[in-house]
Image (tube, rainbow, N blue to C red):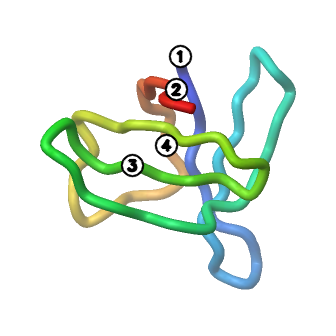
Amino acid sequence: MKVMLRQNSQGTLLVYVAKKDLEEEVVKQTDSPEGKIYTLANGWELAFPNLEEPLKLPQTVEAKRLA
């Protein structure tokens, strides 16, 4: 699914999922063999296989929902 990554005014990373009209804060970041995994405030886990470092925001990227 396509998601948009951006930062709010406090510097917190936000994920926006347009198809679900959902915007949530990232509460946990982990690295895995399949790339970065972000845990959102609502409990969703999203995997980002091709996320470049350093992160340039805002940007739209492909993500896979794990949980």
Q: CA distance from mark 4 to mark 2?
A: 18 Å
Give me the disc on residue 37. Answer: 3
Sequence order check, earlier mark of 1 and 4: 1
Judged left or right of residue 53, residue 57 is right
Q: Which quadrant would residue 54 be assigned to in this image?
A: bottom left
Amino acid type, residue under disc 2 in the picture: Arg
Q: Give the structural element (helix, strand or loop) at label 3.
A: strand
Residue position marked by numbered label 2 in the rendering: 65
Amino acid type, residue under disc 3 in the picture: Ile
- Please state the horizontal and vertical placement of residue 55, each as a whole percent of the image: 34, 60
Amino acid type, residue under disc 1 in the picture: Met
Judged left or right of residue 67, residue 9 is right
Marks 4, 3: nearer the viewer: 3
Residue at the bottom extreme, as displayed: 10
Q: CA distance from mark 3 to mark 2?
A: 10 Å
Amino acid type, residue under disc 4 in the picture: Gln
| Image marks 1 and 3: residues in contact by CB distance under 8 Å | no
Q: Give the structural element (helix, strand or loop) at label 1.
A: loop
Give me the disc on residue 59. Answer: 4
